[in-house]
Image (spheres, grey):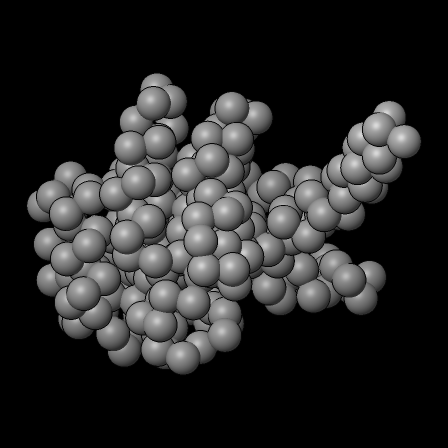
Amino acid sequence: MPTLLSVNLNKIALIRNSRGRDYPSIVHFAALVLEAGAAGVTIHPRPDQRHARYADVAALKAVVERFPGAELNIEGYPDRQFLDVVLAARPQQCTLVPDEPGQLTSDHGWNIVRDAARLAPIVAELKAAGIRVSLFVDPDIAQIDAAPATGTDRVELYTEGYAHGYEQGEWLGEWHKHAAAAARARELGLGLNAGHDLNLDNLANFVRIPGIEEVSIGHALTVEALQYGFADVVRRYVAILKAVA
């Protein structure tokens, strides 16, 4: 079965917020990516709501429900406000991420060896509501080994090390590290997701790792859309102006 794509819409929300109105609409772009063949959409609301907002969750859930089989994945740090929003919406998946409140972007996985006892009741609360749970983790065998104690359904491998290595032309070591972590997760019966800085250049090699069920991609996809689609829009504007002249 092929790896599924969940498109992270945070950057669309960031552009929207910069103008103070609902343009571009995150709901519109959610429908656009699902119509284009993505299996789901992801948002990661942070406490300052500088991009995705808690108010976006219910609207996105309604969009996803129009596409049979599509999924909504809500990422975030599991403080009480975040959990209450997720429990009210009941998305198909919730990915728990160990971000500090003001953190620019996710840059490390959970220390599950240390935090398993704290994570377990949170995971249980989400699962009791029928929500699949994934934990954001570094490709570290010790952290993977600790994950089952939390009750989590899946782990999401933090792939920045692989992506950075790919840019430098020295990615094979990181690929093998992620492959070993993935293999251990499967041995333990855990589902397997991956994400962070995956893009059009590095994705194909990465998903040769067996068993990856879902990748979440947002920043790179948005930049690539600007690169490959921007010129076409400029041409459309020019054509309009020439037609009216």
Q: Is residue 137 visible?
A: no
Q: Is residue 90 left or right of residue 55?
A: left
Q: Nearer the viewer, residue 245 or 182?
A: 245
Q: Position of residue 47 (x, y in %)?
A: 31, 71
Q: Is residue 128 above or below residue 33?
A: below
Q: Quadrant of residue 48?
A: bottom left
Q: Position of residue 75 (x, y in %)?
A: 35, 56
Q: Nearer the viewer, residue 140 or 228?
A: 228
Q: Position of residue 92 (x, y in %)?
A: 28, 38
Q: How many numbered marks appear?
A: 0
Q: Is residue 89 above or below residue 195?
A: above
Q: Nearer the viewer, residue 191 or 244?
A: 244
Outermost residue to the top: 68
Q: Is residue 188 left or right of residue 162?
A: left
Q: Quadrant of residue 125?
A: bottom left
Q: Residue at x 18, y 59 (%)?
A: 83
Q: Quadrant of the C terminus?
A: top right
Q: Position of residue 178 (x, y in %)?
A: 56, 56
Q: Quadrant of residue 96?
A: bottom left
Q: Residue at x 53, y 33 (%)?
A: 33
Q: Residue at x 50, y 74 (%)?
A: 104
Q: Residue at x 72, y 65 (%)?
A: 165
Q: Is residue 169 visible?
A: yes
